[in-house]
Amino acid sequence: MTTRMTHGSASVRAGERHRTSGWLTFAGTLALVVGAFNVIDGVVALFKDDYYLVGQSQILVFDYTTWGWIWLVMGIIQIGIGAGIMAGKMWARAAGVVLAVLAAIGHLAFLQAFPLWSVLTIALCVLLIYALCAPPAGAIGK
């Protein structure tokens, strides 16, 4: 078996082409972090309503139980997508962008409940979208 090393990529076996980049590894790690943040948001919203700054009647769109389930499910999916991004899967990159956009919009709606956490998560989502859309040339997923 022939193995060769190229700058900025993983080892490549003959007949197999899998290139990674620092941006994709960063994006995968960031997707895992955003997913973990959303899981934490979900668990807190489900089990500790009084943690947030406003009452349930003042939060936009849904109550805390609904937001808890939304964040929990979205976070678990984002963690899986982060693993897929780190494995070099193209579907994970596309799904990562879609879920980062949905999470950013969701945190805009959740902004009144916990402003600092939501602003931080929105910023991480924007950074994740950039990292997934602008990897170096030649870095392709499977």
Image (spheres, helix red, strand yellow):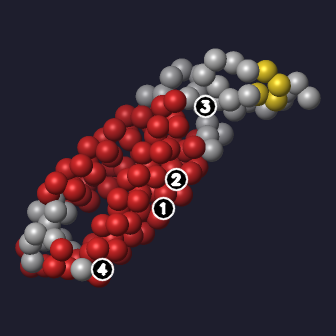
- The relative height of residue 138 versus residue 108 in the rendered view (above or below) is above
Q: Secondary structure at mark 4?
A: helix
Q: Residue at x 46, y 40 (%)?
A: 27
Locate residue 129 relative to residue 116 in the image: left or right: right
Upstream in sequence: badge 4 or badge 3: 3
**Separation of residues labelled 2 and 3 (CA atoms):** 16 Å
* Residues tagged 1 and 2 counted as in contact (Cβ below 8 A): yes
**Place of residue 62 in the rendered image (x, y in percent of width and height, measured from the top left):** 21, 75
The residue indicated by pointer 2 is 81
Inter-mark Cα distance, 4 to 2? 23 Å
Q: Name the residue that disc number 1 marks.
A: 77
Residue 105 at least partly seen: yes
| Residue at mark 4 | 46
Mark 1 vs mark 4: in front: 4
Residue 1 location, quadrant:
top right
Q: Residue at x 37, y 34 (%)?
A: 130
The mark closer to the camera, 4 or 2, is 4
Q: Give amino acid for label 2.
A: Ile
First-in-chain label (1 vs 4): 4
Left or right side of 130 for 48: left
| Dot 1 amino acid type | Ile
How many other residues sit within 10 Å of disc 3, few (<14), some (14-19) or many (≥20)?
A: many
Q: Which mark is residue 20?
A: 3
Looking at the image, can residue 91 be seen?
no
Q: Is residue 83 left or right of residue 73?
A: right
* Residues at circles 1 and 3 in contact by the CB criterion of under 8 Å: no
Q: Residue at x 61, y 36 (%)?
A: 141
Disc 3 secondary structure class:
loop
